[in-house]
Amino acid sequence: MRIQSLLVSAAWAAALAAPGMARAQADVPHTASQADLPYLESLYTQLHAHPELSRAETWTAARMAAEVKPLGYAVTANVGGTGVVAVLVNGPGPVLLIRTEMDALPVHEETGLPYASTVTVKGADGSAIPVMHACGHDIHMSVWVGVARAMAKNRGAWSGTLVMIAQPAEEVISGASAMLNDGLFTRFPKPQFALALHDNADIPAGTLSVPPGPALAAGASVDIKVRGVGGHGAYPATTHDPVTLAASIVTGMQTLVSRENDPFEPAVITVGSIHGGTKRNIISNEVDLALTVRSYDMKQQQRLLDGIARVAKYEALAAGMPDDLLPVVTYVESTPPTLNTPAFAAMVDALFVARFGKDRVVAMRPSMASEDFNAYGLADPSIQTTMFWLGATKQSTFNAAKAAGTRVPSLHSSRFAPDYAPAIATGVEAMTAAAMMVLAKP
Ligand SMILES: [Zn+2]
Ligand SMILES: [Zn+2]
């Protein structure tokens, strides 16, 4: 039923924004994105200069609340930690959730930009941890505010309920479930539709991409404590060396992907961190490994995790490690794959192609990155979800890299410097258009 009426709405929206047609005054998504751009650019540079780590987004959350409250949204703070929920009830119709994340990363910014972050926070051991919006969540927040403004100022153009959420702790994939566990779908209107975007360094600013189904991989974080018996570096026979054992485990795990995994089912095992020992001539007592594991299928994901535990245990036994000193494997956090609802994604894609033209709506392969946006759809399978990509790289930088066969700085890089003005303008126009399609007047 809903799909049917949405298809009609999409056709209407497509007709309104048909390429070549003079922009009607009623083209709210376009006019709003242009009119608010200077305001949103200024907001972006402020957010960029004030990054906060996961679960510590207090300044950011207060700013998000302060941005939308004067627009008439009913704002609730501290949902699932620092999360913000802003609700605008505007007549009969469906409930649409639009999500932004708020957290930044422990990265030392090296962009050299005038608004670059110089923020550091104190770690548990007293050391200074640099903080940077290296994933572009500051872009997402700027777009989110732009959409909130466009929807609030043009209430005559839509009907329904808008639930705007600013989510904490996406980078540690716990913020979405924290908001759900704190009553996101019971204390506030429960959505039938949920939308999100993520910036993407692999496509130019001004472009978009809507994954038709699989969008982002399942991710799991795994820690392995490799234990041994330490001693003098000159007397290895009197020890059980955890460094050589850790090396065997790291290389042994590579065969889980290269030899045991179906080559047509993408999988990644990355050991992102390895720490052990203090001095050249001391054999240490233990080595710590930290891994990330990615795939698109939960059964396959479990096979990889089981394989990691198996390799760790039997490499230790092969090294002659006693039973009471086998490696300790800890599953830290995990998230399922992010799968767009195909029918909903197809409508969003058709809307974008009609509005922006085929050249600006590009096809991309599914990504091995992970997200916790999936949590909203998994909480209730009747909710239709779509996450789309928002191009972030300056067109000239993109062209130069393509010509030279090199890569541009990726998300999470210390040199990630999005071309924020066209990205934000495109994001606001795209997300507002998608919101107005879902919340079209009957
Ligand atoms: Zn990220
Ligand atoms: Zn991100």
Image (spheres, rainbow, N blue to C red):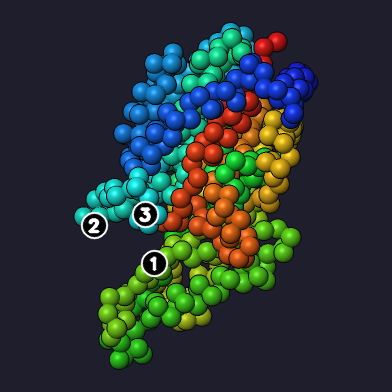
Q: In this rendering, which labeled residue sits more in front, label 2 or label 1?
A: 2
Q: Residues within 10 Å of mark 3 (few under 14, many from 20)?
A: few
C-alpha gap between disc 3 and disc 1: 34 Å
The residue nearer to you, when weighing 287 against 48, is: 48
Q: Amino acid at mark 2?
A: Ser
Q: Earlier in the sequence, mark 3 or mark 1?
A: 3
C-alpha gap between disc 2 and disc 1: 20 Å
| Element marked by disc 2 | loop
Among the 4 quarters of the image, the one containing residue 207? top right
| Residue at 49 percent of width and 65 percent of height | 271
Q: Earlier in the sequence, mark 2 or mark 3?
A: 3
Q: Position of residue 323 (x, y in %)?
A: 43, 73
Q: Amino acid at mark 1?
A: Asp
Q: Amino acid at mark 3?
A: Gly
Q: Is residue 77 above or below residue 422?
A: above
Query: Looking at the rendered structure, which numbered label has been put on residue 127?
Result: 2
Q: Earlier in the sequence, mark 2 or mark 1?
A: 2
Query: Looking at the rendered structure, which numbered label has been put on residue 288?
Result: 1
